[in-house]
Image (cartoon, rainbow, N blue to C red):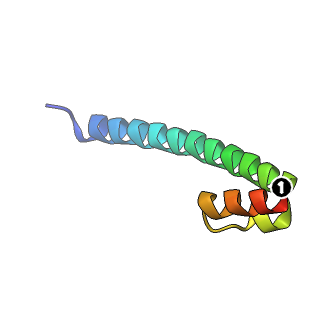
Amino acid sequence: MPTPRQLLDRLDSRHDELIRKLDELNAQIEQALAQVGKARGDMPRSVAVAPDPAVAERIVRQAA
């Protein structure tokens, strides 16, 4: 049976791993948001704020 210290060390190690994974996930989310922001910045304003893809497509067709 593990000692209290061993359990604490194991818990601390798992905590560090979870924090590392959360940091990686946060970096991926930030990268995705930056890409979406850039893509929206490249669109006409009316398309960038469209509530859904069908509306955005209709706006683009009407503008063409």
Numbered label tally? 1
Residue 15 image point, x, y percent: 43, 43
Q: Using the image as rendered, state which of residue 2 and residue 34 is in the foreground.
A: 34
- Residue depicted at 19% across the width and 32% down the height: 2
- Residue depicted at 34% across the width and 35% down the height: 10
- Residue depicted at 36% across the width and 37% down the height: 9
Residue 34 image point, x, y percent: 75, 49
Q: Using the image as rendered, state which of residue 26 and residue 36 is in the foreground.
A: 36
Q: Is residue 50 above or below residue 10?
A: below
SS for callout 1: loop
Can you tell which quarter of the image residue 52 is in?
Answer: bottom right
Residue that extends furthest to the top in the rendered view of this protein: 1
Residue 1 image point, x, y percent: 13, 31
- Classify the position of the C terminus by image quarter: bottom right
- In the figure, is residue 16 to the left or right of 61? left
- In the figure, is residue 27 to the left or right of 7? right
- In the figure, is residue 18 to the left or right of 33? left
Q: Using the image as rendered, state which of residue 52 and residue 19 is in the foreground.
A: 52
- In the figure, is residue 2 to the left or right of 58? left
Q: Residues within 10 Å of mark 1 (few under 14, many from 20)?
A: few
- Residue depicted at 86% across the width and 52% down the height: 42
Residue that extends furthest to the left in the rendered view of this protein: 1
Amino acid type shown at disc 1: Met
Say which residue label 1 marks. Answer: 43
Residue 38 image point, x, y percent: 81, 50
